[in-house]
Image (spheres, helix red, strand yellow):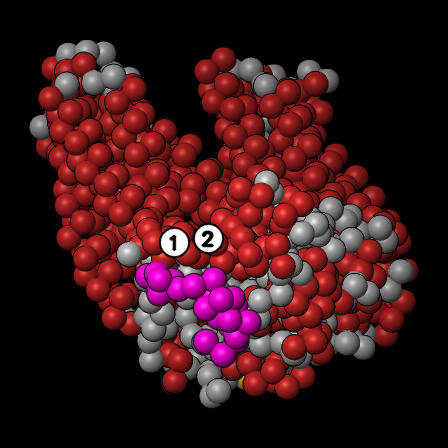
Amino acid sequence: MIYPFWDVTTGYGILMATIAIIHVFISHFAIGGGLYLVVTEQMARRHNDEPLLAFLQKLTKFFVLVTIVAGVLTGVGIWFIIGLLNPLATEALIHNYVWGWATEWTFFIGEIAAALIYYYGWNKMAAQAHLIIGWIYFIFAWLSLVIINGILTFMLTPGKWLTTGNFWDGFFNPTYWPGVIMRTGVCIMLAGLYALLVAARQATGDFKARIVRYSVTWGLFGLALTTVTQRWYLSSILTTLTTKVLPGSILALRSAAWLAIVIGGLLMLAWVLARRLSKIIAGLLMVSGLVWFGSFESFRESVRKPYVITGYIYGNGVEVAKTEKYKKEGYLAQITYRTGDDGADLFRHACRSCHTLEGYRPLKPAFNGADPKFIASIIRGAHLLNANMPPFFGTPAEADQIAAYIYQRIDQRPLDQIYPAADLGRQTFALRCAKCHKPGTASDKSKSFAGQSTSDLSTMLDNLPELAEGMPAYTGTAAERNALVEYLQLLGKAAK
Amino acid sequence: MNLPNYEFLSAPIQLITVLHLLTLSLHFLAMNLLLGGVIIVLIAGIRKQWDDPTLVKFVKLFPVAMAATITLGIAPLLFLQLVYHRQVYAAAIVSGWFWLLVPAVALVVYYSLYRTSLKGDRTGKLSVPALLVALAGLLYISLVYSSVFAMAERPKLIHELYAQDQSGWVWNPAIGSYLLRWLHMILGALAVGGYWIGAIGKNSPVAYQTGKRFYVTGVAVAAVAGSAYLMTVPSLMQTRAIWVLGIGILSTLGSLHLFFKKKFCLSGMLLLGSMLTMVYARHMVRLLRLADTYRPDSMRFMPQWGPFGMFLICFVVVLVVVAYMVRLLITKRSAELSDSGAAN
């Protein structure tokens, strides 16, 4: 709250994902591709395989243009965007890991220099010297992964660092080693996928078949290594995280698992069609790889919620260490950059990192027809909605201010004026109950409504705050209440 | 809750400042070669002053210069954010979209430079449109940097601008505070670009003469812009920065003298020295402007000597390896060429 808030209409999550996923997709190729190039060049030189060397030279050009240019600048893009979206977390990371980053930078210098010399050195350097440069490139590129993985995994599983504050405790955290090996597998897999994209452009024939099958082997080996080590990685996360695994995380993980199967299948298909592998299949493999990576990274991000650094800083920049201070003094007292509109300032710092009013994870549709009292109750009990919401540590008056800010921007008509009478019960349930008690989930209460009379359910609605901690009082209109009672009875009957 | 505090410096502020100034000077050297070089080559190309092989020779250097500019730009930004995070992030957020566009524009610049270079390789001709796109992009990036970093030195202005607009579409309106600074950098880039063109093109009389002309003119006009900028920071005259700047001016004159004598290596070293003094002066300006609100040495010092040692060792190793690789590129190539000559 010591920084201004960048109030962009685009959701923070979308901005971050767009840059980050493209970057990781390229940067992992930058490592695996380096290994592919040098290992294959060594093989080609040993067998004096001129066509293969010509192919590698072509691949190097593609490799340099993709990795050195797009890879590097999307990396810079990540650095820029994290400073804009969560400056406090970035500040904390830089202070703790400046020498980690500085070390990565040294490897980066070596990596870039080696890549350029390798590229310009084709046909100009002695074979042995060119190979040495290739190996140097790969070693530096992989070492940069070894370093950045320490910082990346620290954010997810800081481990003992939370008590010791020691650089190495945070660096070699519980997911460090599985992370390094799993990502190395991804690098190898992507090397195969990118090489197939270049191989698909070769003329149909024996050489193409050889190159395609060789690249498929890389893809399959990388995929196998990734799949095996991913289990180790997942077990390290799930046993260390205190929050429960969310449905969104499960979905992302399942998508990644299915996509791994798709990639495996497409690789097999490429093997079979090796002589005449089309650009379409190679392109599909690339797209699958990108979506797979997107799903995996989305899982990693979602499982970390509600934190940006687990147990240390929440996603909205609220520091765990200062929660007592927030409770005592409120959020406004901590917000350094004020605009004169306290409701807006509070909304930005408490909610806006994850929610927009109408775009990404919108609040307007979620609260249309609600009253300020109900909205304030939801804000106060935000952490009870689901496990990825940070708790609200501001004062009750500040919750009211945020509620008023949201209320001014939603459809303020009662639900019976927004929706037809036939749908009123369902819509009232969606607004006032389903945020926590979604049918079909663990918190579904439908069975408990079975056999309840209108008067029983009405009495229950009168006493909601007594049922459980954080339950908002019923504050809707009488018409909504009647329709809700009828709908609860319907749910009860259906669940019986 | 007893959690580790992140508000600390893991090395003495003096050490971080030295690293920042040194890496920033190296970044400027590469960036000036690129920016100044692009402008000079464009002018020479459009006026048809140079023959095509000379143009192509320089154009092929630009992607490498871009790679060096970006790579050498990472460390100074890291060290800057380590010490001046509060100011830099706040200013960057206020101009969020302009700031975020920097890597995107740099991507376009990079590909334009590669396009020019590859076209030069293929056709032996200069691609003027691609180079113009690259120049426009470089000017945009430099202007955003000047605007954001000048804003970062004025915390009150950041508060005022943010209170008015939180969308990230705010351009620093205090143009007077950074226009001269930006102009000084652009003109300085022309001077350094002139040095590089002259040094690399020493065997081409036309390239050397052009480089010399830009080096001399660039130094003269950059000195005027720099002096005008200094007038806007009168308190700087009372600090040791003014003496350091004096050394910088002498160093530049020495570099020019050696350049005329075609002693490019020594001339370049003095030029780097001069760059260091300019960077130091900028650092002093920042300290003076922030003096009322922030003192970097007030941050808590909690050493991380182990990780710092890791960085230092890796840095030395990488420098040695890079030198080895360059040697391999040069010597093995010459050896191979002489082998093939002997075989013939």
Please say if A163 is above or below A197: below
Please say if A300 is above or below B218: below
Most foreground residue, B343 or A153: A153
Magenta-highlighted residues? A443-467
Residue visible at 58% across and 76% down in the picture: A393
**Left or right position of A389 against A28:** right
Element on which disc 1 rests: helix
* Residue under pointer 1: A491
Residue B324 x, y percent position in the rendering: 33, 50
Is residue B195 visible in the rendered structure shown here? no
The reply to whether the magenta stretch includes residue A459 is yes
Instruction: Report the chain holding disc 2.
Output: A
Please say if A47 is above or below A354: above
User: What's the residue type where badge 1 is placed?
Assistant: Leu
Neighbours of disc 1 within 10 Å: few (<14), some (14-19), many (20+): some
Instruction: Report the chain holding disc 1.
Output: A
Residue visible at 55% across and 47% down in the picture: A424
Dominant secondary-structure state across the stretch colored magenta: helix
Most foreground residue, A256 or A394: A394
* Residue under pointer 2: A487
Residue A215 x, y percent position in the rendering: 18, 31
Rendered image quadrant of residue A266: top left
Marks 2 and 1 close (CB-CB < 8 Å): yes
Residue B69 x, y percent position in the rendering: 55, 46
